[in-house]
Image (cartoon, rainbow, N blue to C red):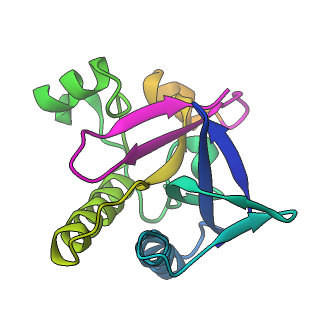
Amino acid sequence: MDSNSRILDQRAVAYEVKIGNDGTAIYDGALQTVRYWRRFERGQEEYTVDGTIYTPDIFALATGNAQFGRLYDARVKDKFKFDIFTSDDRKKGAQYGQVPKREYASSETTLRLMWRFMEQYTADEDLSPEGGVGALYSDGLDKSPAYLVDQGAAHEPGICYKHPDTDPRWRVLQ
C-alpha cells in the first residue's frame, strides 16, 4: 500500500495507487485495496509514515485518471453516464452527499463491487471494522459534463467511500 496519506475530515486515508492505463492493473488494485482493508481490520497490518503509526479510516483506490473523476481511461474503458441515465436514487444520494452527481460506468461498477466484498467479509468473518473502502475521483463529477473533459480545468480531488453498514459518503478534499 502506498504510504500516501491525507486527512479527510480528520480521517487518515491510505491509497493503493495505479497508473490508470491498464484495466487489469486497476482490477488488481481494487482487490488489493479491499485486501489491505481486510488485513488491517483483522489486526494483521500496521501502517506507518515517517515512524508515526496511522490508523487509516479509509482505504482508497486511486489512479492517474482521478483528476478527471474516474479510475479508468475514458477513451478505452470508462464511459460517462449522462444525466439521462441517472436514477432518482442517485440524484437523492447526491443531494445528501452520499455519491457524486455523476459517475463513470466502469469506475462506479468497480467501486460498488469493492463495497460488496467489504460488506461480505464483514459478515462472514464477524468483523467490527472501523475503516471503510473508497475511490479517489475529482469534484468535476459534481460539475457539468463538459467540465470533466476539459483537461485544462482545475480539479479538486474528491473521495467516494463507504464503511460497512452505512450509507456511502462523497467528500471533496480541499
The residue range painted magenta reads 151-174
Please state the total of marks drawn on the protein image.
0
In screen coordinates, is 76 left or right of 46? Answer: left
Residue for point 41% across, 46% down: 161
Image quadrant holding the C terminus, namely top right
Nearer to us in this view, 172 or 18 = 172
Look at the image and tell me whether residue 2 can be seen. Answer: no
In screen coordinates, is 152 left or right of 143? Answer: right
Res 52 → quadrant? bottom right
Nearer to us in this view, 155 or 93 = 93
Image quadrant holding the N terminus, namely bottom right
In screen coordinates, is 134 left or right of 153? Answer: left
Residue for point 17% across, 77% down: 124
Residue for point 61% across, 34% down: 10
| Residue ranking furthest to the top | 95
Q: Position of residue 129 (x, y in %)?
A: 35, 60
Nearer to us in this view, 53 or 61 = 53
Q: From the viewer's perspective, is residue 118 above or below residue 57? A: below
Q: Position of residue 153 (x, y in %)?
A: 69, 28
Look at the image and tell me whether residue 25 can be seen. Answer: yes
Res 95 → quadrant? top left
Nearer to us in this view, 101 or 11 = 11
Residue 167 drawn in magenta: yes
| Residue ranking furthest to the right | 50
Q: Where is residue 75 in the image (x, y as percent from the top left)?
A: 50, 58
Q: Position of residue 51 (x, y in %)?
A: 85, 65
